[in-house]
Image: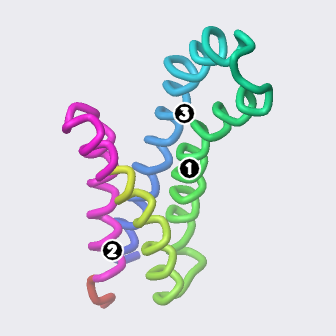
């Protein structure tokens, strides 16, 4: 195993761990209160009450699946497959980092976590494999 593989696995671990923590906190701090106070009062259609929690969970699901794929990728994919996967998952992580930094003016730790994962992916996928 070379350092690029370790960087990709580390990025996957950071992304998957961040996803699990994010999903738990979203459920506790946003989805449950939102469903209890806003969506269940009858002002919104029932479909919206079902859709909003699912949409809030989508980012965590995306980051988790991407992280798990990155952790397995060095053992299953060749160089081109790793590059494609890093671009796909890295674009999601980069979007999370930029969105968190912009949306919270840097006060949310998500931009640091997913920024680090993106940097590790860039280092692991772009550097020449020796």
Query: How far apart in space, not on screen, are marks 2 and 1 (Cα)?
Result: 19 Å
- What residue does disc 3 label? 23
Left or right: 98 as drawn, with respect to 24: left
Q: Mark 3 falls on what kind of element?
A: helix
Q: Is residue 25 above or below residue 8?
A: above
Is disc 2 placed on a helix, strand or loop? helix
- Looking at the magenta stretch, what is its main secondary structure? helix
Which is nearer the N-term, disc 2 or disc 3? 3
| Residues marked 3 and 1 touching at CB (< 8 Å) | yes
Name the mark nearer the viewer: 2 or 1: 1
Q: Tell whether position 53 is magenta.
A: no
Q: Position of residue 96 (x, y in %)?
A: 38, 50
Left or right of residue 92, residue 129 in this image: left
Q: Residue furthest front?
A: 43
Asked where in the image residue 69 lies, by quadrant, the reply is: bottom right
Which image quarter: residue 41?
top right
Q: Position of residue 129 (x, y in %)?
A: 33, 88
- Would you call the spot at circle 3 few (<14 residues within 10 Å), some (14-19), or many (20 or more)? many
Magenta span: 98-126
Few, some or many residues within 10 Å of mark 1 (<14, 14–19, 20+): many
Q: Which residue is mark 1?
A: 64
Q: Viewed as shown, does residue 48 lie left or right of 115?
A: right
Front one among 106 and 10: 106
Q: Are marks 2 and 3 in contact (CB under 8 Å)?
A: no
Q: Which residue is mark 2?
A: 124
* Whole-number angstrom distance, CA of label 2 to CA of label 3: 27 Å
Q: For the point 60% across and 77% down, which residue is it?
A: 76
Q: Does dot 1 land on a helix, a strand or a loop?
A: helix
Residue 120 on image: x %, y %: 30, 64
Residue in the foreground of this view, choosing between 95 and 66: 95
């Amino acid at each position: 195993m070379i350092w690029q593989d370790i960087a990709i696995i580390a990025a996957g671990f950071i992304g998957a761990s961040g996803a699990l923590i994010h999903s738990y906190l979203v459920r506790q701090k946003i989805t449950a209160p939102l469903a209890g106070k806003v969506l269940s009062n009858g002002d919104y259609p029932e479909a919206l009450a079902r859709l909003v929690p699912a949409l809030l969970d989508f980012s965590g699901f995306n980051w988790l699946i991407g992280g798990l794929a990155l952790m397995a990728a060095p053992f299953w994919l060749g160089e081109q497959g790793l590059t494609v996967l890093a671009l796909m998952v890295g674009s999601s992580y980069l979007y999370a980092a930029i969105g968190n930094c912009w949306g919270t003016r840097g006060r949310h730790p998500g931009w640091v976590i997913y920024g680090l994962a993106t940097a590790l992916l860039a280092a692991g996928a772009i550097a020449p494999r020796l």
